[in-house]
Amino acid sequence: MDSAVDSALDLATEAFVAHRNLLFTVAYEMLGSATDAEDVLQETWVRWAGIDLGTVRDQRAYLVRITTRQALSRLRTLGRRKESYVGPWLPEPLLTAPDVAEDVELADSVSMAMLLVLETLTPTERAVFVLREVFDLAYDEIAEAVDKRPAAVRQIAHRARAHVAARRPRGVVSAAEARDALEAFQRAVETGDLQRLLDILAPDVVLLGDGGGVVQAALKPVVGAGRVAHVLGRIAAAASLQPAQVNGRPALILRLNGEIDAVMAVRIDDGLITGLYAVRNPQKLSRMERETTVSR
């Protein structure tokens, strides 16, 4: 009897490990928080380990369904937490491998800019959008995951697609274009070349800083090229800038005395930087010392 139980647990573990990176990516794209995504995976494992695998037709779909339901529950809790968050809330950045950028759709879906767009969806809309547009699940599979009828899921998907399309970055930015823009941005900041910086920033650029009330950061968005350039000038005077791949896109790590102080990601529209996202909250920087694997 014990050997049968051990064998079943081994099979459950094997299936879970095989799909773990996918499940993490689903949870992370729904939550924007790696810490919460890891908690969701723990909850998913507990439920998965108690299931009779003989009744499971498609292990990947079943695991995605459990993960989605757990993430939806966690997302509603996160929403209440964000309401009392000090200053702007930004997603938890991930140091990612260079090959993530080669999968354009995956890189786009985990980018800081897209995660912030997904924040404007309802929890169910976000789940449906992520499962359909990023992971290409069938409508009936999504319906089971979000406890809706397939026809309703189609309507939700249509509404979410339109919502995201109106808010996502304009124009497709290749990895090379993003890298070139960030290199030019880094040179302008490091040299204090104000005119070059203003040439790269959109006139209505927005800088969001996330200190979480733990470290100093602007409590409101900084809007306009002149104001943003002034803030960046102060940052550059104190920190060293290091290029990195963050959330599948080129970004900068700011170091003070050799320690990571902040991660800065950008949004690019029509060749200009329209958004700057600076995460300083130390509780959100734990994934910057080693690469996190994301996958579809």
Image (cartoon, rainbow, N blue to C red):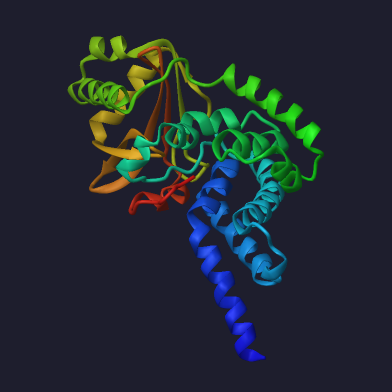
Which quadrant of the rendered structure holds the N terminus?
bottom right
Q: How many marks?
A: 0
From the viewer's perspective, is residue 127 above or below residue 187? below
Question: Is residue 58 rendered to the left or right of residue 170?
Answer: right
Q: Position of residue 77 (x, y in %)?
A: 70, 48
> Looking at this view, is 181 or 220 the one in front?
181
Which residue shows up at 74% across the image and 44% down it?
146
Q: Is residue 38 visible?
A: yes
From the viewer's perspective, is residue 210 above or below residue 274? below
Q: Position of residue 252 (x, y in %)?
A: 31, 35
Q: Position of residue 242 (x, y in %)?
A: 24, 38
Res. 53 image quadrant: bottom right
Q: Is residue 263 visible?
A: no
In the picture as drawn, the residue positioned furthest to the left comes out as: 191
Q: Position of residue 266 (x, y in %)?
A: 39, 27
> Looking at this view, is 244 or 187 the one in front?
244
Which residue shows up at 44% across the image and 47% down it?
294
Which residue shows up at 56% across the image and 46% down it?
26
Question: Is residue 21 rendered to the left or right of residue 86?
Answer: left
Res. 262 image quadrant: top left
